[in-house]
Image (tube, rainbow, N blue to C red):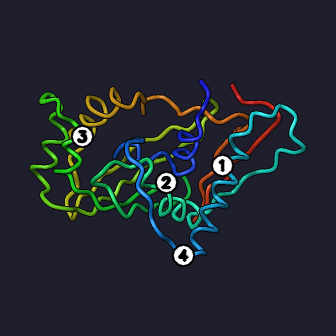
Amino acid sequence: MKVSARALAAIALAVLFVILGSALESRSTTVDSGTQAASKSMEAKMQILGSKDPRPASYQAVVITTHEANSYLIVHSGEFLPPGVGTPSITVQPEHAVAAGDVDFEKLSRLYPNPNDMGPKVLAAMFPGTQHVTITAKIQSESAGVLVQIESVVVGGTTVPKWLVDYIIEKVLQPKYHFDLSKPFPYPDHVTRIVLGSGQTTFLRGPTKRP
């Protein structure tokens, strides 16, 4: 299974915003030159990570800082986050990542017109208006790829029950966006391990892709 540029970006951002949506609508934004530069630095590193060249000159580690990741989100999040999700940010620390953003669950629930998709409708009923959402996940780098375990979802000051989080992931998001959090996300070519540190994510690389 090859990893697309969009999926690579998701991995670089700890794969967390997959719980809130996927590529749906493009929206432009105006940002300062420093943010633009950090975003372009992130894009350049993504291109290195996405390279399929079997004979690169070297396989130096690629380090993406949270400043670069958050700058990329400021510039490009409108291209892959759905309407109703705004001001995304991410922080990382060893083996953990935290994603946050402001979510209008009523607007988000309109993306699921199927009356059987009860998860988004339940959230819209529970949390009216725009709410600040924080998602905490444990990130484990294994031989087969990156395993993401959602540990908590907090909306406003309320922790969403685990059964509801599991229901939304299993019954709503996984079928719609074709991912499976019970299995590792495969590495890009030539990436052998991903290490989360304080404020940065390091992609270790080698001449062959680990099976």
- Return the x and y of residue 134 as percentages of the image width and height: 33, 59
Depth check, front residue: 16 or 51:
51
- In this figure, which residue is indicated by the disc labeled 3? 111
- Return the x and y of residue 101 as percentages of the image width and height: 34, 61
- Mark 2 crowdedness (10 Å alpha carbons): few <14, some 14-19, many ≥20: many
Depth check, front residue: 35 or 132:
35
Q: Say which of marks 1 and 3 sits in front.
A: 3
Q: Where, quadrant-wise, is the N terminus in this rendering?
A: top right
> Left or right: 7 with respect to 194?
left
Is 190 placed above or below 150 here? above
Is residue 69 at all visible to an observer of this figure? yes
- Mark 4 crowdedness (10 Å alpha carbons): few <14, some 14-19, many ≥20: few
What residue is shown at x 22% (from left), y 63% (from top)? 156
- In this figure, which residue is indicated by the disc labeled 2? 96
User: Picture quarter containing residue 35?
Assistant: bottom right
Q: How far apart are marks 3 and 2 (CA)?
A: 29 Å
Is residue 198 at all visible to an observer of this figure? no
Residue 32: mark: 4
Asked whether disc 4 touches disc 2, contact meaning CB atoms under 8 Å apart, the reply is no
User: Picture quarter containing residue 50?
Assistant: top right
Q: Say which of marks 3 and 2 sits in front.
A: 3
- Badge 2 element: strand
- In this figure, which residue is indicated by the disc labeled 1? 46
Q: Earlier in the sequence, mark 3 or mark 4?
A: 4
Depth check, front residue: 57 or 184:
57
- Badge 1 element: helix
Amino acid type at image mark 2: His
Q: How far apart are marks 1 and 3 (CA)?
A: 29 Å
